[in-house]
Image: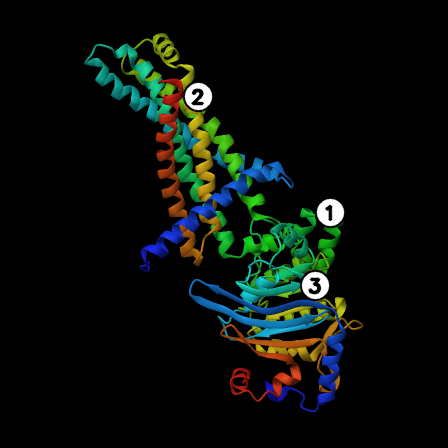
Amino acid sequence: MIETMPQEMTSSDVEQNGQHTGEREVVVSFEDVSIRFDEKQVLQNISFTVHRGETRIILGPAGGGKSVLMKLTNGLLRPDSGTIRVFGEDITAMSEKDLFLMRSRVGMVFQESALFDSLSVEENVAYRLNEEGVSEEEAHTRVVEALQFVELEQAIAKYPPELSGGMRRRVSIARAIISKPDLILYDSPTAGLDPITSTTIVDLVIKQRDVSHTTALLITHRMQDAFLLAMSRFNTETGEVERLTDGGIDDSTRFLVLNEGRVVFDGTTLELVRSTDPWLRDYLA
Amino acid sequence: MPLVSPEVFAKQELAAVQDYSILSWRAIINIFSGPRYWADIFTQMDSIGVGSMPIVVLTGFFTGCVLALQSATSLQAFGSVSLTGNLVALSMVKELGPVLTGLMVSGRNASGMASELGSMKVTEQIDAMRALGTDPVRKLVTPRLYATVFMLFFLTIVANAVGIAGGALVSVGMLGLNASSYFHNSYRALAYGDVVQGLTKPLFSGFIIATVGCYFGMNTKGGTQGVGRATTQAVVVSSVFIIIVDFIVSRAMIGIFGK
């Protein structure tokens, strides 16, 4: 996969990217965050920042703490030490009530979709709107819009057990984006899917990134998905996802690689493929 | 199960009691502030109350029948078969009605709650609920708690009534007692304190069934195997708690009413 990456991109591009991101508002920041479950240290002294409009791809072997990191970002877990700031606010010391307010700006796609089995697709997607007391007609209109975005409007009346794995992920994405969040967390949205369905899901992520420019964190185990995200864009005129011309790389996509609870890489796509770290090269290969 | 040191074991058990207490307290106080999920409360009332009706009616009826049969055999030795109604009514209202209803509803609903919430936990639906801005305790536990306490109270009354009717059927049909005398004796046997005692117990049992069932469901770990374990634990713990609390309430009521 590394061979498919453009090697001609200059380091000035990288510097430019760095400078560019440095000026933008920090949406998520981890400072020395550690968490352990029973005797197992899951994350150890994790520090990184995600800026507005950035798509941060989180890579790493299974069991490396990626999903835990995602749940920490949404306040679903609390760290043992360190500080996590989301939208500039320290969420580690926040009450559950304040966390609910913070989460209203965050959309999350869970690893196994986590759709409510007893609710229809429409009720699942409209869940947050119903909780916020949005009128039935408005909620229905927005559900249809969100389902059209994921190209699944025909499944509006179905129930989750009637849907395939890929369809469930798409409903989950629709549920996450319906409230137009400022931050989207994708926890392994392509895990367990066949390559074609995975590409469909990644296309939706690219579409969401390029249409709404929403800040996002995305976990994936599939290297091809990660590089597809970094090297493609959504063409609003044709409505298709296409490769960036001249082997270009999307500026807003950066990588974070975790291994055994530690950050082993934090940087741009180019820095990742040019890394000389033996473990990283081995992992990417 | 791995062996742990007594200190670690004690800490784990204390932490479990603490978590259970916090969950129960939050489930109780949530009703005093919004948002309140009335639709969920009524759905649970239907599922727990109406859904448990057949087993409660059958259990109550046959308990009354067997109680009449057994007491008549013993009372015959003293020539007091006519007091069968007193014995059936007192036993049903003070003890067997509340306890058996509690145990039957526990077997049906504590397990149902633990498995439903447990499945939601292991499939991340509880986390999804939190991520979507809903407090799972408010949405899932509070409706189950209030619905169980409310419906168990009425289910116990139904069980008592059906039990006394079952006793009547056996007394009149098999023992040849006079129906009017049976019901008159049953009515005379019951004092105010007996009824209060019998109707206080389901309030405690309902609380135990809902909080224990939800606690094990919300703390499920380890996939489908964990759901099975949580379900079993919920039924065992709630049943044992119901019997222990029954003894404590009985003693307290005897202290208050003197009988």
User: Where is mark 2, residue-wise?
Assistant: B196
Expressed as whole percent of the image width and height from the top left, the position of residue A60 reads 54, 75
Which residue is at a point 40% across and 56% down the rendered structure image? B225
User: What amino acid is labelled 1 in the image?
Assistant: Val
| Mark-to-mark CA distance, 1 and 3 | 28 Å
Residue depth check, mark 2 versus mark 3: number of the one nearer the observer? 3
Label 3, secondary structure: give it. loop
Residue B29 figure quarter: top right
User: Depth check: A219 or A121 in front?
Assistant: A219
| Mark-to-mark CA distance, 2 and 3 | 57 Å
Q: What label sits on residue A134 in the rendered view?
A: 1
Which residue is at a point 59% across and 53% down the rendered structure image? B130
User: Both on one chain, marks 2 and 1?
Assistant: no
Q: Chain of mark 1?
A: A
Residue depth check, mark 2 versus mark 1: number of the one nearer the observer? 2
Residue A71 figure quarter: bottom right
* Residue A151 visible in rendering: no
**Number of numbered discs:** 3
Q: Chain of mark 2?
A: B
Whether residues under marks 2 and 3 lie with C-beta atoms below 8 angstroms apart, the answer is no
Expressed as whole percent of the image width and height from the top left, the position of residue B168 reads 35, 16
User: Depth check: A196 or B129 in front?
Assistant: B129
User: What amino acid is labelled 3 in the image?
Assistant: Gly
Q: What label sits on residue A88 in the rendered view?
A: 3
Label 1, secondary structure: give it. loop
Expressed as whole percent of the image width and height from the top left, the position of residue A28 reads 66, 67
Expressed as whole percent of the image width and height from the top left, the position of residue A282 reads 51, 85
Circle 1 residues within 10 Å: few <14, some 14–19, many ≥20: few
Q: What label sits on residue B257 in the rendered view?
A: none
User: What amino acid is labelled 2 in the image?
Assistant: Val
